[in-house]
Image (cartoon, rainbow, N blue to C red):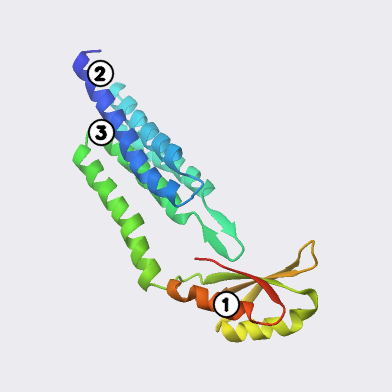
Amino acid sequence: MENADLVVIIVRLGLSVVFGAVIGLERELAAQPAGLRTHILVALGAALFTLVGTEVAGTDPTRIAAQVVSGVGFLGAGAILREGPTIRGLTTAATLWAAAAIGLANGLGAYRSASAAVLLTLVVTVGLKLIEKEYLPRRRGQLVALDVEHDALPAVVPAVCALLPPAKVVSVTTSLNGHHRIELQAHPAPHGELPELAAKLLAVGGVVGVQISK
């Protein structure tokens, strides 16, 4: 292998590591299961598969790319978690897919395309996230969890639902200390109003604890 070829390989793999780290860091800061290391390895692996495809005579790199995309799809499915009525990890699964595509682009030497994709991915994951939090309601609704004294359950449910229209009870469980845990799915409230809403819920007789998903 010539030195020039070695430099090209190092550059392509190195850029994949850097680009994967940039995307993974954002997911790491968002406390997602698939974070920095996962995105780096996905981008690096995709770039390496592509490089191998270009090195082996008679191999079509596009076929290898298609297999990489399929494999990352299974990996992304593992990042999707269901928590009660909500589903988490869809964005992380999408960023894993994007990291693989960026690694493929680096493996083929399409550095400008890979760089642009990283910037746009950050715009979507960081910039649009801020806009969604501030201006756009979440379609899946907001999860509200209440700890309620045992005897107060019959009176608490209608009182809470009156404060959270429209809202529906998702589950009712009993903890070891005898309190009931009620989970409700409600229309999302603006972040600035969450402290006031929590105070109103705590003021309901029999409610001893409140948790509202952000």
> How many marks on residues?
3
Mark 2, other Cα within 10 Å: few <14 / some 14–19 / many ≥20? few
Is 168 or 145 nearer to us in this picture? 145
- How far apart marks 2 and 1 lie (CA) works out to 63 Å
Is 99 or 33 nearer to us in this picture? 33
The answer to whether 200 is drawn above or below residue 40 in the figure is below
Q: Is residue 188 visible?
A: no
Residue 167 picture quarter: bottom right
Q: Secondary structure at mark 2?
A: helix
Q: Amino acid at mark 1?
A: Ala
Residue 157 picture quarter: bottom right
Mark 1, other Cα within 10 Å: few <14 / some 14–19 / many ≥20? few
Instruction: State the image coordinates of residue 31 (x, y, percent, origin top left).
Output: 48, 50
Numbered disc in front, either 2 or 3: 2
Numbered disc in front, either 3 or 1: 1
- Find out whether the residues at labels 2 and 1 contact each other: C-beta distance under 8 Å: no
> Image point 74% across, 70% down: which residue?
180
Mark 2 or mark 3: name the one nearer the start of the chain. Answer: 2
Q: Is residue 138 visible?
A: yes
Residue under label 1: 199
Question: Does residue 183 appear left or right of residue 80 in this picture?
Answer: right
Instruction: State the image coordinates of residue 70 (x, y, percent, origin top left).
Output: 43, 42
- How far apart marks 2 and 3 lie (CA) works out to 15 Å
Mark 3 or mark 1: name the one nearer the start of the chain. Answer: 3
Residue under label 3: 108
Residue under label 2: 6
Q: Amino acid at mark 3?
A: Leu
Instruction: State the image coordinates of residue 192 (x, y, percent, origin top left).
Output: 43, 74
Q: Amino acid at mark 2?
A: Leu
> Image point 75% across, 83% down: which residue?
154
Instruction: State the image coordinates of residue 150 (x, y, percent, origin top left).
Output: 79, 74
- Find out whether the residues at labels 2 and 3 contact each other: C-beta distance under 8 Å: no
